[in-house]
Image (cartoon, rainbow, N blue to C red):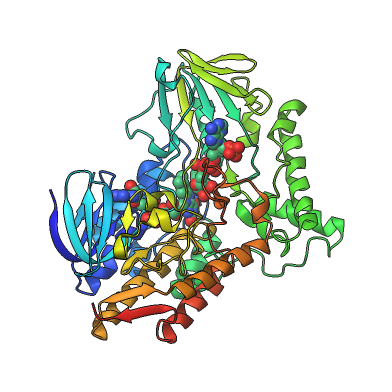
Amino acid sequence: MAAGHTDVIVVGAGFAGLYAHYRLCGLGLSALGFEAAPDVGGTWYWNAYPGARCDVESLDYCYSFSPELLDDWRWSERYATQPEILRYAHHVAERFDLRRDVTFATRVVAARFDRDAALWTVETDKGDRATARFLVAAVGPLSVAKLPDFPGLEDFVGRWVMTSAWPHEPVDMADKHVALIGTGSSGIQAIPVIAEQAARLTVFQRTPNFSLPARNGPPDPAYEALARSDYAAHIQRNRASRGGVQPKYTAQPGAIEVDEAARLARYEEAWDLGGTRMQAAFRDLMSDVAANDTAADFVRGKIRAIVVDPTVAQRLSPYDHPLGTKRICLDTDYYATFNRPNVTLVDIRSEPIERIATDGIVTAAGLYPADLIVFATGFDAMTGPLLAMNIEGAGGHRLADAWADGPATYLGLMVAGFPNLFLVNGPGSPSVLCNMLVAIEQHVDWIVDAIAHLRETGRSRIEALSEAQAAWVDEVRMVADRTLYPLANSWYNGDNVPGKPRVFLPYVGGFDTYVRRCAEIVSQGYAGFRLSPA
Ligand code: FAD
Ligand code: NAP
């Protein structure tokens, strides 16, 4: 049982928590960490499903804080698999001795701010209790899974698993009839791999998603050479970009401004080169429905060309949201998988799932037998992990009450009424719309620099002001309303969790703009924050 007092408590030991320990240690501050998983890695510990890999190129989806680390790690693929990314997390933890202060397999279940003592106290599911001046919630945006709530699941005699909590021992699929529910990024990555391993695979799709070919393979030697020739410049280009990765297209006319031949040529090129290029092909794809329709039509055309059965192709074609307004998926052979004789697609909008039976899934059209059910049904994103900590701020105010109508933060970093509580990639920051490793480093640097500043100026308390927070909340909403994002039913808006307030969660104004704002606020003496002695 860990207990005691430290300068900082860090909840979570994914990439954000690990980097927080590294920076805090560098400042000579004491830190205590708690992590629900038995080891480091966060997302990359939990989501160990077949086919899991990153969708930002690994040369960019990695830490940049240490030139030595950049030099001594080589990625084997353009988009590394989950085991390789987890090995990287272990390597970082070992190289910088970052496990030392973390208590693993321990979940923080309550966090309370004592106004008189100006201290945070956390409690864990193991009965630990610890206090600290500062609390850093590095709990991740996608770490609370939506639990399957299908009637009859308890009667199912086979095995069921979630992509978001995949077992670390092998899951035998040979000779098995697998049913998979959910066709977001996780399902779309897992389906082609499971189809190869299982005897049969039945995919239950509620909403088709746009998926683009990743064109995975070894890292692009030219890109790697460019990055390694001057890492500082490479990192700077990522940090100065809208999405934390330097854009693949710099000259971006509007989609309708060019003629059809030029437009299609660019879409063909983006499709052939792979990755998320398609979304960046023209500057107005995320702000103009007519422009977006041209890209969506192009992708639907590709689906028709790949999928042999026209009925299946039609079912796989998204029509209910503009391309990119739900997180775009990157795949390897996703659409072609539906040409395999052992794969069946079930459209659960036309035949809803009624219940899970002992031996399979029952829809309005009948029973689909299954020995193994895979739930790829997503997360209570961004707010879920924070609310699950039962946080009480100054005066006993609960975060759950403060956020009853949706999350309100200042810069996604702090919440008015919750002094000395820092969020890493909280709602209202670019977070999931960004290369998250770059976003994590920027947030942790901001937080640790703020703590250092307090120390240097003889103060020990920082709190977001309500007016500054309200203005930021308005800005987050306004920039989202200028885009097509609010048109989709998506977890970005909280739509996937029944009862969750509909608020666009991340800041879509661009990482570059956001970083400038954070820096300006600091240079103005932490404008919008109150800094005070305890
Ligand atoms: P996490 O990695 O989620 O780590 C948070 C940790 O906090 C978890 O280990 C969790 O167990 C722990 N925790 C949470 N609450 C508590 C508590 N109360 N007590 C104790 N411990 C707690 N982003 C990209 O930019 N590019 C990608 O390619 C990409 N791919 C992804 C693939 C998948 C399958 C998923 C789910 C997400 C992906 N993301 C991607 C987003 C990904 O979450 C981030 O890139 C990044 O890993 C987040 O790191 P983190 O440390 O902030 O959070
Ligand atoms: P998701 O995008 O929310 O997808 C969940 C899927 O499950 C959707 O198809 C959803 O359908 C379906 N679903 C949910 N509840 C259902 C129910 N009760 N009945 C039937 N279907 C149901 O979740 P995810 O795929 O885990 O991805 C979440 C995020 O994690 C991604 O957007 C991405 O940011 C990240 N991620 C990234 C990668 C990567 O490529 N690197 C891989 C995995 C995850 P509806 O659409 O109809 O709700």
Q: Is residue 109 left or right of residue 426?
A: left
Query: Picture coordinates of residue 34 (x, y %)?
Result: 24, 53
Q: Is residue 480 visible?
A: yes
Residue 527 higher or lower than 196, as above or below: below
Query: Picture coordinates of residue 410 (x, y %)?
Result: 46, 69
The residue most toward the front is: 395
Which residue shows up at 17% across the image and 53% down it?
129
Q: Is residue 10 left or right of residue 340?
A: left
Q: Nearer the viewer, residue 227 or 262?
A: 262
Which quadrant would the C terminus be assigned to in this image?
bottom left
Q: Is residue 188 left or right of residue 7?
A: right
Query: Picture coordinates of residue 208 (x, y %)?
Result: 65, 37
Q: Which quadrant of the figure has residue 122?
A: bottom left
Q: How many marks?
A: 0
Q: Which quadrant of the figure has residue 99?
A: bottom left
Query: Picture coordinates of residue 469 (x, y %)?
Result: 48, 70
Which residue shows up at 63% across the image and 24% down it?
346
Which residue shows up at 71% across the image and 31% down it?
315
Residue 52 higher or lower than 437, as above or below: above
Q: Nearer the viewer, residue 9 or 310?
A: 9
Q: Is residue 100 visible?
A: no
